[in-house]
């Protein structure tokens, strides 16, 4: 049996979500609590129930929580007025990019530690890009494995143009035809690739709810073609991107017993250095429900099955993060802190069980 590594728990409440409804939820939560706040983010929930951790199966130690400006946190104090434009300006001016880069630089010595497995509980998925960017500087062949209901590999402009084409989908805000955007949660993979840090062949994304169809590249609309072309660049570069429908198919579930098969053939992470990122919106569960855009259709058990089939028991895990947990949605979705804690523990315990296997 392998000696169990310790999971060291870190947190960051950074949440520059410009969505109008998200800001309203934060304000409603603030008012309902009478301005009092003790649980400020997902890290605090995990720490609150620390004594309930199954340390025999999931040995953990406490790390720290990275600071962020109050107005950019998951639970702002509303000392000053905050508007959606406040967050849009922050992102478009490069504020999100700069913050995530500083985060990655400051935690560079933490992630990749051979004696511990660092785990980040966070909100904005853009933070993953900051960590991975730093790791790839010294480990350019590191594998990035992401579980996400959305593919965060499109440029902000292409993503915004697609929303505009589909008549301004109510779930996503459309910022106008002249919008170019900047680094954010929905584009961090794009920037890792375009800046030369991430080789597409080292990327795997599981659980995406919607992917471009083959017909899109032949459509007359330039917005749709651009969307399809950006996606094709990943597929042709060797990225392994599997939809939720494919993963949930009965035949694929059976095939996981024999490994992970993609369009590029069998795939194993044995002997590789790996970073694992879980956007909780991939999950069909209480945890998935309290994410920015609601839950997907993948179970925690499915994630564990995929990681097992990828042979991560023989890989070096450089770090793990669990992102996009929006505590302001707990009241709306009738989800308790205990449910969030229990599901994150289930996920991490499953990974710990894999890691102790020979």
Image (cartoon, rainbow, N blue to C red):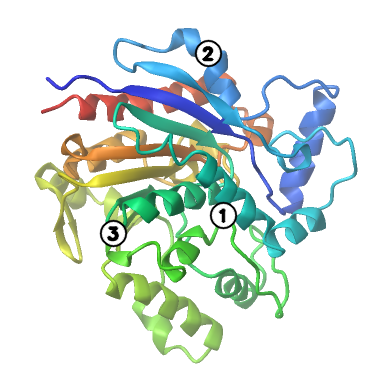
Q: Which residue is mark 1?
A: 185
Instruction: Please identify the quadrant where the C terminus is shown.
Output: top left
> Is 264 displayed left or right of 208 in the figure?
left
Q: Is residue 30 positioned above or below 276 on the image? A: above
Could one spot residue 148 in this view of the protein? Answer: no
> Is 118 displayed left or right of 33 in the figure?
left
Cβ–Cβ below 8 Å for labels 3 and 1?
no
Mark 2–mark 3 Cα distance, whole angstroms, equals: 36 Å
Q: Which residue is mark 2?
A: 49
Q: Is residue 4 positioned above or below 300 on the image? A: above
| Residue lying at 57% horizontally and 22% vertically, measured from the top left | 45
| Residue lying at 32% horizontally and 65% vertically, measured from the top left | 199
For residue 202, which numbered disc appears in the image? Answer: 3
The location of residue 98, given as percent across then percent down, is 63, 54
Mark 1 packing: few (<14 Cα in 10 Å), some, or many (20+)?
many
Please name whichever residue, 229 or 149, is drawn nearer the observer in this view of the structure.
229
Please name whichever residue, 52 or 330, is drawn nearer the observer in this view of the structure.
52
Q: Earlier in the sequence, mark 2 or mark 3?
A: 2
């Amino acid at each position: 049996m392998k000696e169990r590594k310790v999971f060291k728990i870190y947190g960051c409440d950074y949440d520059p979500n410009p969505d109008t409804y998200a800001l309203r939820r934060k304000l409603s939560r603030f008012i309902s609590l009478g301005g009092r706040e003790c649980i400020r983010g997902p890290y605090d929930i995990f720490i609150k129930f620390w004594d309930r951790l199954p340390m025999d199966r999931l040995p953990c130690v406490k790390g720290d929580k990275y600071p962020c400006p109050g107005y950019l946190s998951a639970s702002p104090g509303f000392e000053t007025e905050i508007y959606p434009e406040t967050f849009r300006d922050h992102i478009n001016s490069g504020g999100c990019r700069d913050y995530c880069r500083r985060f990655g630089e400051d935690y560079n010595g933490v992630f990749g530690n051979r004696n511990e497995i660092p785990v980040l509980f966070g909100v904005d998925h853009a933070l993953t890009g900051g960590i991975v960017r730093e790791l790839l500087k010294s480990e350019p062949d590191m594998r990035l494995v992401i579980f996400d209901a959305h593919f965060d590999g499109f440029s902000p402009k292409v993503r915004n143009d697609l929303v505009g084409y589909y008549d301004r989908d109510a779930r996503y805000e459309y910022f106008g035809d002249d919008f170019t955007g900047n680094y954010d949660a929905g584009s961090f993979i794009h920037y890792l690739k375009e800046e030369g840090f991430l080789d597409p062949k080292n990327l795997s994304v599981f659980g995406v709810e919607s992917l471009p169809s083959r017909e899109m590249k032949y459509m007359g609309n330039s917005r749709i073609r651009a969307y399809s072309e950006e996606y094709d660049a990943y597929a042709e570069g060797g990225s392994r991107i599997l939809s939720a429908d494919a993963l949930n198919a009965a035949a694929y579930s059976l095939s996981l017993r024999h490994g992970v098969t993609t369009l590029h053939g069998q795939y194993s992470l044995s002997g590789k250095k790996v970073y694992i990122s879980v956007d909780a919106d991939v999950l069909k569960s209480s945890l998935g429900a309290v994410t920015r855009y609601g839950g997907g259709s993948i179970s925690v058990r499915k994630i564990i099955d995929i990681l097992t089939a990828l042979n991560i028991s023989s890989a070096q895990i450089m770090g793990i993060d669990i992102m996009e947990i929006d505590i302001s949605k707990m009241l709306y979705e009738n989800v308790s802190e205990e449910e969030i804690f229990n599901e994150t523990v289930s996920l991490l315990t499953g990974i710990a069980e894999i890691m102790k296997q020979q």
